[in-house]
Image (tube, helix red, strand yellow):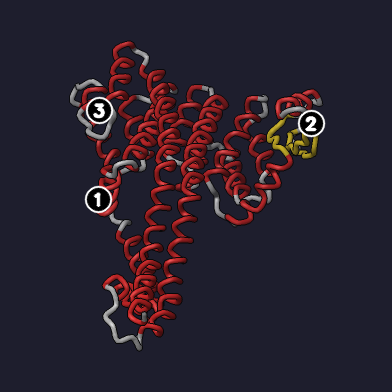
Amino acid sequence: MATFLYKAATPDGKVVDGALTGSSRENVVAQIQASGRIPIRVDEAAQRAAAVPRRRLFGRRISAEHISDGTRELSILLRAGVPLDRALQVLVSLHEDSPLAALLEDIRARVKQGATLADAMAAQGPVFSPFYISLLRAGESGGALEVILERLAEHLERSKDIRDTLVSAMIYPGILVVVALISIFVLLGYVVPQFTEMFEGVDQVLPLSTRITIAIGDAVQRYGVVLLLVLAASAWLIRQRLRRPASQYALHASLLRLPMVGHVIVKMEVARFARTLSILMHNGVPLLKALAIVKDTVGNRVMADGLERVASGLKEGQSFAEPLAENAHFPPLAVQMIRVGEESGRLEDILLQVAETYDRDTQVTIKRTMALLEPALILVLGAIIAAVIISILAAILSINELVI
């Protein structure tokens, strides 16, 4: 049995919270529903405690996680029959200590004045993506807003899972690189100069590797701070340059050409493209309009430009799969699956299968790539440190031979 913390809405729209003990999350949800309340959020106590520092860390910024949680909670309330105005009021109370509260209050005020939920959210600027707003419009026009919100929540949660998988996989290699670089910097800037004094009075030509190591160590000791400042300035300049569309395009094209990284990026983008397009088409958005929306959700500019050419081909009367097949970065398997879906009239369902397939492939590829990258990093960084140590030992041994 575990303890779960929950937030629930009463029939009159008030938010209450508390703790219940149950064998599983579903068991606790059933207990809350049996009491006549609507469960909004149920988390195990240990997980909720671990999430508190993260919320404080991000301060007042509205994150993708805030949007995902709010979407899921609004879907639950609407499915339970709570009117939209009251559901938004419940969410404001639920997130009163979150940066989401002011946003929800503004959305609620606009809805009370007669605006649709999609228009109220579109007025919030870039917080909600064009994909999000377009789906809401489709849901409101079709009278299935709660269903659309549930699909949006699932889409956002799936995107978060993929993103978290990638971030988690990069934590260990990142720590390894940082620690190794600090070790090399200390070794060259502090340890090597200590041996330099020992070699100064020796009337003998030191080995080439030792001379190179001493020269690098001397440069690090004298100009280390300047080097760090130059690196920081270079990073800032690169970041500014990457804001230009041409520079972004060149970087994204280079990333696609990398042996392992390119495959991961392609699979992630194909999964995102297929899932987003499937959801849009399933909810009545025409293919051409859906492609225009999907293009903005694809992160890689090269692949996004390829989708523009696909849209142009559709306008000229081509089938959907035909211009996709001409895109060098689009996998042949995905093209064939889309062609089958187009011919059978089940394009939306096939696109969802494509997304599921490439989601799984992405996770497998990330794990395999990290499994190869970690030992490779250890070997490379270990070889650099070993080369520095061996160059010093070679000089010491040569001096000992001279003395003998």
Q: CA distance from mark 3 to mark 2?
A: 52 Å
Q: Residue furthest bottom?
A: 201
Instruction: Name which residue type carries label 2.
Output: Met
In primary-sequence order, the first of circles 3 and 2 is: 2
Give the foreground label among 1 and 2.
2
Residue 254 spot, x, y in % from top left? 26, 48
State the image coordinates of residue 361 (x, y, percent, origin top left).
41, 30
Work out whether 250 lies above or below 368.
Answer: below
State the SS at label 1: helix
Counting residues from the start of the chain, the first of labels 1 and 2 encountered is 2
The number of numbered badges drawn on the structure is: 3
For numbered disc 3, what is the local secondary structure?
helix
Judge whether 305 appears above or below 190 on screen. Answer: above
Which amino acid type corresponds to the residue marked 3 in the rendered image?
A: Leu
Residue 284 visible (yes or no): no
Identify the residue at image location x=33%, y=62%: 240
| Residue positioned 40% across, 58% down in the render | 381
The residue identified by callout 3 is: 324
Q: Secondary structure at mark 2?
A: loop
Classify mark 1: residues with Cα within 10 Å, few (<14), some (14-19) or many (20+). Answer: few
Give the residue drawn at x 63%, y 28%. Answer: 78
Dot 3 or dot 1: first in sequence order is 1
Residue 1, label in figure: 2
Task: Please tell me how crowded label 2 is: few (under 14), some (14-19), or many (20+) other residues with Cα within 10 Å.
Answer: few
Q: Are marks 3 and 2 in contact (CB under 8 Å)?
A: no
Q: Is residue 21 visible?
A: yes
**Mark linked to residue 250:** 1
